[in-house]
Amino acid sequence: MVFSSLTFLFGFLVITLLLYYTVPKKLKNVVILVSGLLFYAWGEPIYVLAMILSTFIDYTAGRIIDKNDNRPKVRLVCLIVSLVMNLGLLGIFKYSDFLIGSFNSWFGLDIQNPFVVLFNNVFGGINGNIKSLPLPIGISFFTFQSMSYTIDLYRRKIKVQKNAASFMAFVTLFPQIVAGPIVRYEDVQNEIDDRKITEPMLAGGISRFITGLGKKVLIADNIGMLWTTVKTMEYSQLSAATAWLGILAFTFQIYFDFSGYSDMAIGLGKMMGFNFPENFDYPYMSKSISEFWRRWHMTLGGWFKSYVYFPLGGSRKGTARTVINLLIVWTITGVWHGASWNFMLWGAYFGVLIVLEKLFLGKWLEKIPSVLSWLYTFVLVVFGWIMFDGVAPGTVDFGDMFGQVFAYIGAMFGANGVFADNFATNAFVNYGVMFAIAIFGSSDALKTIIGKVKEKAPGWVQYGYPIAQTAVMLASVAFITTSSYHPFLYFNF
């Protein structure tokens, strides 16, 4: 289920925060735990059981690992149980339909997914029979978050959490439970049982939340309407201008949608006394693909670096091994985003580009004018977004996926014989201002301007910032109440 009622979401947040501020300190984690479960159950009433199971097994594994500090085999078994359980949940819910569907497509078979059969036998009377497993929202986020706890505990990097409610509160922190940022236990271990909400944190949290809300509602949702329309068109008939405008719309939609949600999560975290890690750092200003991925979804990149790339040897075992390790990490990154050939192609695409930059291209990019290195990066990222979202949902045939990607890229370069058409002209007129806002907002220009104003402007000018944020908040609420188009793109991962 996609969260469609932002009105409900706002009401939930207000009630939860009021209750959180009202209860004694010792009950605040209970509020987080209960609100997190209710928040998740609102979207997936049945799948909340999967989250509880994941949390229970990781908590139990952590306690056993801690109690058997001198018994390495017992510790290893507990770690393996945690990994198998978490990865098993991902495998069943996220990948089993795709794998069985692909196998059926290749060999002309009609094998049923046994987990779908089991689901229908257990829950069919409640929800009706299903043909494919619904994906638990945010499963890739909360399983990675919970799994990092047992891995770091096994590595002796953190202390065990003995309070079950506090551990469950860590996993079910509702601000980032379904779309990140991916918060590891070490990020909040000093705050989970002892935190203070200072006035600067509260003010900063409110400001950050409003910023994220404006990004998501005013920019992502508005410009995303163009991509939603273009994506449904026949790619073989797109004009070049329409194709470029469509994928550029998605390029900005996914950034402002995801970074906006991350800002809201970080802001809510501050309002509750937590300091969540940053997730974006103006990625569209990057001058190499490697830099882009140091700035985009930083918590996911850090997770894979810590738990996959470094354990494989990183770059410490020679060039050939480094290349293999990078390709492994990027293949997994693609798979993490979804069970579909296009995500695998997308991950492999960026893996190859990063390998090329590691081998020789990076040095060349440092020598050319910065505007050219930026253009190289931005255009290749845009091509990546075609692979990411320009393929029809449910495509299991590898050839069909390639065909759709190359048909769209071909349209961008005039393969359909039309440079511009009436749709492109109207889209440019209707969305031109929004594109200008998106371009400005995805750079650090506004941040620089605000910094200069705070540094040099007269004192009375400082009131302009809260006034502007109030305007953003009011405009966002107005748009929420008048539009039904509010997709949260990363809730699907």
Image (cartoon, grey):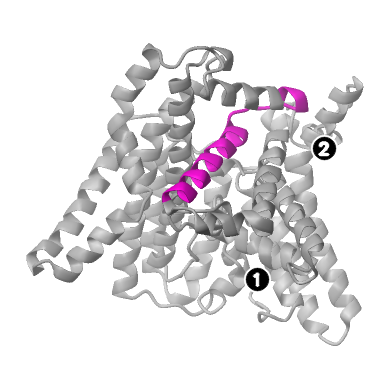
- Residue 147 on the magenta span: no
Vertical placement of residue 256 versus 202, above or below: above
Assign a secondary structure to mark 2: helix
Assign a secondary structure to mark 1: helix
Taking the spot 40% from the left edge, 13% from the top edge, the residue there is 421
Answer whether residue 181 is visible to the viewer in this image: no
* Residue 387 in picture, x, y percent from top left: 62, 34
* Residue 132 in picture, x, y percent from top left: 74, 30
Q: Which residue is mark 1?
A: 164
Q: Quadrant of the C terminus?
A: top right
Amino acid on which the number 1 mark rests in the picture: Ala
Between 30 and 10, the one lying in front of the other is: 10
Mark 1 nearby-residue class (10 Å; few <14, some 14–19, many ≥20): some
Taking the spot 49% from the left edge, 63% from the top edge, the residue there is 31
Taking the spot 86% from the left edge, 73% from the top edge, the residue there is 76
Between 28 and 413, the one lying in front of the other is: 413
Task: Give the mark count.
Answer: 2
Between 40 and 147, the one lying in front of the other is: 147
Q: Quadrant of the N terminus?
A: top right
Vertical placement of residue 208 versus 240, above or below: below
416 to the left or right of 153: left
Mark 2–mark 1 distance (CA, rounded to whole Å):
30 Å
Amino acid on which the number 2 mark rests in the picture: Phe
Q: Which residue is mark 2?
A: 115
Q: Main secondary structure of the magenta part?
A: helix
From which residue to which does the magenta span run? 371-400
